[in-house]
Image (cartoon, rainbow, N blue to C red):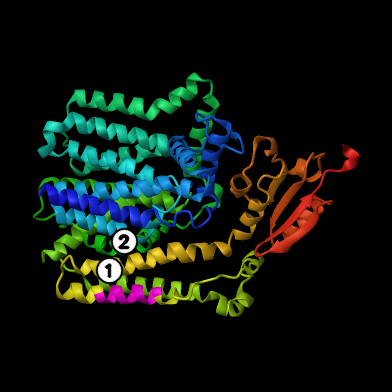
């Protein structure tokens, strides 16, 4: 049995490496989040200051440094670039799959561990996150591990390891706090409170375990904040706390959304797992269940609803905010799928309809995307946004096979539904996995680079062209981090004040990048009267202002 488990772990690790590592450097980093974090890591290397997180060589107080350290270390090994920025998430992807398999087999059996791993791997958003350069895969895993070990603490069958599980729960919560901030503890605290209320406040605990939890959490979670205070950086702590509060009160960074935003994202973004998980949202889902699987089920259900409701209340709506839910959703999906295979539950007709219908939409949308250049002339007259029209001038370069991938996804899903309806068994999921993974990987390797051509490519190419030149580069009237990372900005070129760069006595050329919107272009010409037009390309116009010799 041990040899079988070892072999399965090795196979999962190899599969994870093959799925998550290849191609992570094939597409440029996307504004804002990917480039934001990568730039902070690059500036750590440039300045040699690994203590302060910076953007444009100024303190950046929105995030703690743990993930930035990972990226900076990766860049020291592989060099500054897209691969290094995304490599930490590829590694945590492999680790996550191994953890889910082993946690699943321990709370129930090997089949459950494999199903949980499979559900996480083949669902759209969870997979994409492991190919990205954003903080959330590490942050979410740390929160999940904290809740998982606390769930074990509350499991009567694990009473002999209470202190260890309390310490591990606190350790991982501390790491989560040092990855993205104290909201991690809010998620845990609210989940614990709801769990207590649902269980009528029945919790067996020991005060020495509480003391261990508090001590480990204070040490692991407060280390960076204590260090900031001791080194006289109290203002960073204040700014950090103010930022966390603002996220709850305002539509920060323009990221607003309707109240059910995260419901929609999770339902249609974590497919196919989400449609299986729907079977568990009923009162008698745990009927006949007991042991560790029932304990973890309650914690996963509680944490899912806490995060979903919490970030539905928060006015800032960003897809990352509900991404912790990928863990409980895929757990619930695995729970439902294994019960279906045992003949206890059924995949209902409406679930089959949702699964096939969503797949048809994704498949046809992907096929339409690959053929967009052939019919975009029919779409452009109906597009009112001048920036979008300008971006559509870009030309994509598909290999030619991509249009059939959407059809493959639809075909595999229908095949799975038919086969699973006749005989609910594990092999049927191989068909579903094949369709989803072929679709996702094609999207990653082919579609993402092509989509970038219609969004930021021309601006990023301009920044890369200025790499190494002693100059200033300033986007006009829009926020971006790309100019920092892709020009390899150095401290001597960090001037960013628009008024000074537009009309002041600059000492080197300043390049302005403006979106190809007539009103914004005219505004730039007015506010930077001696700017020279360079060229326009798919979404952007480029200008330069040279130093005035008379001011030297």
* Lateral position of residue 108 relative to residue 368, left or right: left
Q: Which residue corresponds to the image point at 46% horizontal and 52% vertical from the top-left?
A: 318
Given residues 260 and 336, the one toward you in this image is 336
Label 1 Cα crowd, 10 Å radius (few <14 / some 14-19 / many 20+): many
Which corner quadrant of the image does residue 259 belong to?
A: bottom left
Which label was assigned to residue 170?
none
Query: Would residue 165 appear left or right of 49 to someone viewing this image?
Result: left
Which residue lies under the disc numbered 2?
A: 122
- Checking the image for residue 432, the label placed there is 1
Residue at the image point whose x is 12% and y is 34% from the top: 159
For the residues labelled 1 and 2, say whether their Cβ atoms are less than 8 Å apart.
Answer: yes
Q: Work out whether mark 1 precedes mark 2 in sequence or the reverse, and give the earlier one.
A: 2
Seen in the picture, residue 234 relative to 384 is either above or below; the reply is above
Residue 475 appears in the rendering: yes
Magenta run includes residue 412: yes
Please state the horizontal and vertical placement of residue 311, each as a whole percent of the image: 40, 49
- Quadrant housing the C terminus: top right
Residues packed near mark 2 inside 10 Å, few (<14), some (14 to 19) or many (20 plus)? many
Q: Nearer the viewer, residue 510 or 255?
A: 510
* 470 in magenta: no
| Residue at (23, 31) in percent of width and height | 166
List x then y, in percent, for residue 93: 34, 50
Can the viewer see residue 282 in this picture? no
- Mark 2 secondary-structure assignment: helix
First to last magenta residue range: 405-415
């Amino acid at each position: 049995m041990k040899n079988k488990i070892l072999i399965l772990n090795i196979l999962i690790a190899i599969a994870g490496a093959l799925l998550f590592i290849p191609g992570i450097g094939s597409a440029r980093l996307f504004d804002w989040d990917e480039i934001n974090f990568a730039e902070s890591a690059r500036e750590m290397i440039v300045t040699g200051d690994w203590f302060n997180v910076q953007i444009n060589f100024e303190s950046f107080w929105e995030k703690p440094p743990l993930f930035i350290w990972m990226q900076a270390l990766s860049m020291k090994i592989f060099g500054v670039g897209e691969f290094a920025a995304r490599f930490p998430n590829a590694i945590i992807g492999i680790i996550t799959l191994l953890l889910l398999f082993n946690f699943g087999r321990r709370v129930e059996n090997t089949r459950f561990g494999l199903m949980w791993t499979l559900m996480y791997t083949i669902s759209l958003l969870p997979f994409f996150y492991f190919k990205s350069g954003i903080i959330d895969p590490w942050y979410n895993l740390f929160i999940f591990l904290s809740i998982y070990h606390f769930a074990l603490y509350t499991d009567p069958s694990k009473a002999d390891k209470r202190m260890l599980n309390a310490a591990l729960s606190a350790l991982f919560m501390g790491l989560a706090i040092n990855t993205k901030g104290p909201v991690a503890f809010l998620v845990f605290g609210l989940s614990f409170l709801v769990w207590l209320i649902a269980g009528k406040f029945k919790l067996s605990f020991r005060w020495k375990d509480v003391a261990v939890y508090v001590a480990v959490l204070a040490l692991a979670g407060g280390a960076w904040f204590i260090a900031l205070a001791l080194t006289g950086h109290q203002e960073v702590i204040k700014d950090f706390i103010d930022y966390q509060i603002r996220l709850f009160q305002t539509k920060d960074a323009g990221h607003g959304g309707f109240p059910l935003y995260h419901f929609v994202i999770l339902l249609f973004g974590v497919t196919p797992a989400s449609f299986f998980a729907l079977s568990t949202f009923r009162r008698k889902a745990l009927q006949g269940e007991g042991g560790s699987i029932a304990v973890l089920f309650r914690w996963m259900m509680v944490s899912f609803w806490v995060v979903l409701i919490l970030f539905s209340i928060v006015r800032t709506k960003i897809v990352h905010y509900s991404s912790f839910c990928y863990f409980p959703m895929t757990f619930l999906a695995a729970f439902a799928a294994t019960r279906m295979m045992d003949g206890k539950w059924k995949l209902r007709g409406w679930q089959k309809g949702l699964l096939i219908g969503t797949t048809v939409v994704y498949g046809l949308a992907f096929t339409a995307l690959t053929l967009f250049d052939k019919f975009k002339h029919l779409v452009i007259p109906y597009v009112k946004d001048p920036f979008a029209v300008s971006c559509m001038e870009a030309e994509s370069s598909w290999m030619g096979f991509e249009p059939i991938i959407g059809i493959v996804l639809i075909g595999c899903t229908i095949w799975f539904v038919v086969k699973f309806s006749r005989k609910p068994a594990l092999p049927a999921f191989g068909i579903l996995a094949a369709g989803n993974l072929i679709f996702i990987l094609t999207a990653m390797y082919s579609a993402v680079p092509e989509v970038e051509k219609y969004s930021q490519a021309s601006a990023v190419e301009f920044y890369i062209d200025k790499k190494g030149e002693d100059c200033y580069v300033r986007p006009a009237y829009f926020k971006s981090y790309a100019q920092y990372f892709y020009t390899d900005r150095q401290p001597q070129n960090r001037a960013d004040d628009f008024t000074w760069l537009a009309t002041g006595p600059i000492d080197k050329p300043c390049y302005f990048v403006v979106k190809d919107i007539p009103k914004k272009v005219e505004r730039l010409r007015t506010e930077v009267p001696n700017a020279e037009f360079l060229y326009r390309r798919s979404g952007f116009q480029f200008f330069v202002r040279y130093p005035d010799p008379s001011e030297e």
